[in-house]
Image: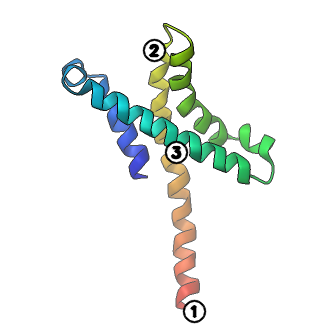
Amino acid sequence: MIAILTSVAVVMLDSVLYMRLQYGTIFFYAEWFFTILFTIEYALRLFSAPNRVRYVFSFFGVVDLLSVLPSYLSLMFVGVQYLLVIRVLRILRVFRVLKLKAYMQQAGFFLGA
């Protein structure tokens, strides 16, 4: 959750010209750190999914892919930097984490029992 929120904050701060001029290099490296981190997470989810095709085309599978794809496309194609705004889709990944909260409460009941 912290990585997702920090990544979104980096994207938002990088869109402010003053901040980009002062901290642009830090934002660049932070963005690539998060992109690689989320790519590894996506690969692990894909590897561990019982039905990989179903995961790829699920809502969260598409969101996960779209949250890292623009960074890689910006390396291959000049002029697609406007797609980097799609990185904000990473915030939708918070919903996956929040969905786990219900299970954590249930685990507390089991632990208490």
Label 2 – label 3 distance at C-alpha: 22 Å
* 103 vs 8: above or below: below
Dot 1 falls on a residue whose secondary structure is: loop
Residue type beneath disc 1 = Ala
Residue type beneath disc 3 = Arg
User: Within 10 angstroms of label 2, few (less than 14), some, or many (20 or more) residues?
Assistant: some
Q: Whole-percent x and y of residue 56? A: 72, 39
Dot 3 falls on a residue whose secondary structure is: helix
Q: Whole-percent x and y of residue 89? A: 50, 34
Question: Is mark 1 in CB contact (under 8 Å) with mark 2?
Answer: no
Disc number placed over residue 81 in the picture, else none: 2
Question: Is mark 3 in CB contact (under 8 Å) with mark 1?
Answer: no
For label 1, the residue is 113
Label 1 – label 2 distance at C-alpha: 53 Å
Q: Whole-percent x and y of residue 81? A: 45, 15
Lower position in the chain sequence, tag 2 or tag 3 = 2
Q: Judge depth for marks 2 and 3 and give the one in front.
A: 2
Q: How is the image coloured?
A: rainbow
Lower position in the chain sequence, tag 1 or tag 2 = 2
